[in-house]
Amino acid sequence: MQDSQENLSHLNQRGEVQMVDVSGKASTLRVAVAVAEVKMSDSTLKAIESGNAPKGDVLATARIAGIMAAKQTSALIPLCHPLAIQKVEITLTADYELPGYKLRAEVMTKGETGVEMEALTAVSVAALTLYDMAKALQKGIEIGRIRLMSKTGGKSGDYERDFGTLGEESSK
């Protein structure tokens, strides 16, 4: 085994990919928040806000899709653990300066591993669903700036995104 592989938790002693063994970890409260932006024209934003989208309630559908996605993360990301998620909250906030929506996913569980991937998956699928529900109004909708904002719980400690220095990150 190479020295560089010693600290890689997803590799076994033979250098093969494996799911991390979390059986020895303490069960703690885990919370993660991820965000995304969906940019669109003013007219598309106004149509969604007024409830005039051809496919129906864009925001409710995107919210439900985000919740469902968080619960299915382990089926989508190969080495993620299936988790008993206790809370998923998806918010979609209209931003007329963008113009578009700012999306936020908060995921919570009490367990041996974190929910960062669940929050990122939730906000990503909510953004994709918003696009799908509004593409009849505008094909050029742009999804971007998907990122983890914070996480709490676990051995590695808490993390909060710090934008004070060119968007660099910090652990607290």
Image (tube, grey):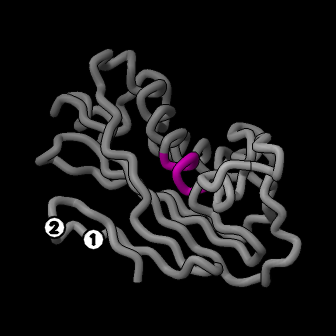
**Counting other residues with Cα less than 10 Å from the Cα at mark 1, is it few (<14), some (14-19), or many (20 or more)?**
some
State the extent of the magenta-drawn residues as a range: 118-123
Res 52 → quadrant: top left
**Counting other residues with Cα less than 10 Å from the Cα at mark 2, is it few (<14), some (14-19), or many (20 or more)?**
few
Q: Which residue shows up at 63% across the image and 63% down it? A: 115
Q: Which mark is residue 94?
A: none
Q: Which residue shows up at 55% across the image and 63% down it? A: 89
Quadrant in which the C terminus is drawn:
bottom left
Q: Position of residue 96 (x, y in %)?
A: 15, 47
Q: Position of residue 7 (x, y in %)?
A: 64, 61
Q: Which mark is residue 165?
A: 2
Q: Nearer the viewer, residue 95 or 163?
A: 163
Q: Position of residue 1 (x, y in %)?
A: 74, 49
Circle 1: element type: loop
Q: Which residue shows up at 79% across the image and 78% down it? A: 25
Q: Nearer the viewer, residue 9 or 1?
A: 1
Magenta stretch, main secondary structure, is: helix
Circle 2: element type: loop
Counting labels gives: 2
**In the rendered structure, are the residues bearing label 2 and label 1 in contact, judged by CB atoms less than 8 Å apart?**
yes
Q: Which residue shows up at 54% across the image and 81% down it? A: 157
Report the Cα–Cα distance between label 2 and label 1. 7 Å
Q: Which mark is residue 162?
A: 1
